[in-house]
Amino acid sequence: MFYLHPSSLRLLHRQLETLKTKPCLKVSVPCLSEQCFQHNTEASTKITFKPEVSPFITESEIQSEFSHHDPGIARINNGSFGSCPASVIAAAQEWQLKWLRQPDHFYYHQLKKGLLESRTVIKQLINADDVDEIAVVDNATTAVAIVLQQTAWAFAERKFNKGDAIVVLQYAYGAVKNSIKAYVSRAGGHVIEVQMNFPVNSNDEIICEFRKALEKAKANGKRLRLAVIDHVTSMPSVLIPVKELVKICRDEGVDQVFVDAAHGIGCIDIDVKEIGADFYTSNLHKWFFCPPSVAFLYCRKLLTRLNLHHPIVSHEYGNGLPIESGWIGTRDYSPQLVVSTALDFINRFENGIEGIKKRNHDAVVEMGKMLAKAWGTNLGVPPEMCTSMIMVGLPASLGISSEKDALKLRTHLRKNFGVEVPIFFKQPEDLEVDSITGYARVSHQVYNKIEDYLKFRDAVGQLVCDGFTCMLLPD
């Protein structure tokens, strides 16, 4: 006996259908009549080969799946909001119609079953031990709130003392930093921010700064309650050596470790047992092709009975986080129900999720190097510290002198050149002159074409030729 998950069965069915229609080796059958002897001789040796049709998705099929994208925009910013193929959108709409047709039946007989299927798929993808370690939520930001809410309660209930510390990276996501202010700082916790150099040259730089921050905190008598570590920082985008940082946390006696991998599943390798964190979250609408918005929160099995609750309290309160998260009131749950359909789409690519990760990484590094060479700049991180995103320096002559300038330039590129790309402002070091202060975070997803990057290259080139600076843009 063996078990095939429904998503695997769907893939097998599709491959069988392909085999039914695939052109095969064609051999002519000889005629047996005497007058056809000469024809028989020729026919019996005549073998016609027809090209084999690949069972994998074609380039034209990829473009068809994303034909709803605005054709006038070079969309090289998959990292912000992700993308969803037409086949997954159609599946989500089917779930919406099931709800609208008969909501009572949907609620009592379909929703929990569908969410369990999604949780099972995620469990297998991240190598968790138990499906009960997986809760499906609407966003990684929600997952952060769940964990930090528990931390805030620990301060309020005096399990933690005023001044106990939480550790976070300098380039943690802005919404996460705000959540830390709202939940931890307000409750009396002390926040330690690990400084990070950018551009960054190696993992060792990050590991060294992280270790120094923890050692300094301990020397000052701080009890380290929680470390929040990005797997991939958002802006600037850097792949963080999480396994090494988690080990340092264990060695230094940090109570709990939470890995924020908003840019995780579908973009990087995830094995939660190897990583060894207590909590791990990732969005599925960024790099896993689900519609917005859906994420998961992994809680290590030993911690699943902790006082973890969804911040929106509804009828399932107290039944465990996965069940609480499965019903937080009347809303659209369809993004959380199409995880297996998204996996079906991914498995249409050669080598599935691994093939897509390699395809995107190799392509974004190639495009990043092309852009840096064209502009006479540099990459912000080495290729091995990139994922499906890469930081590319913009010409210093553009005069990016603040975060406001970076946002204005991004808007200018969108409105006047049809290029969508986020821009990071890097504060220059003291005494630095004519240094690179702006870096574009360039993404690559399966729908991108080289023309998207050439359009960006030429837009920046035109701005430089025109003597443009950000000072010319209106506030």
Image (cartoon, rainbow, N blue to C red):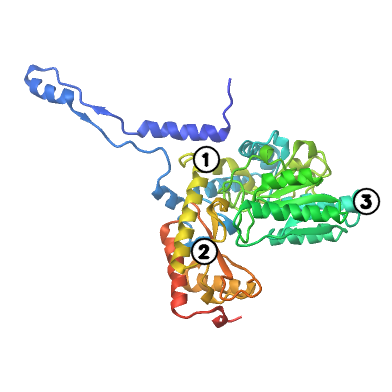
Residue drawn at x 47%, y 59% as measured from the top left: 369
Whether residue 129 sits left or right of residue 222 in the image: it is left
In the picture of the structure, the residue carrying the numbered disc 2 is: 378
First of labels 1, 3 by sequence position: 3
Residue at screen point 61% across, 54% down: 202
397 vs 110, nearest the viewer: 397
Q: Quickly name the residue at label 3.
A: 158
Q: Which quadrant: the N terminus? A: top right
- Using the rendered image of the protein, determine whether residue 331 is visible from the camera's viewpoint: no
Three-letter residue code for mark 2:
Asn
466 above or below 456?
below
* Residue type at the position of mark 1: Asp
C-beta proximity under 8 Å, tags 1 and 3: no
Q: CA distance from mark 2 to mark 3?
A: 50 Å
Q: Residue at x 74, y 39 (%)?
A: 300
Residue 63 locus on image (x, y percent): 43, 52
Q: Which mark is nearer the camera, 1 or 2? A: 2
Res. 439 image quadrant: bottom right
- Contact (Cβ within 8 Å) of mark 2 with mark 3: no
* Dot in front, 1 or 3: 3
Q: Which mark is residue 344?
A: 1
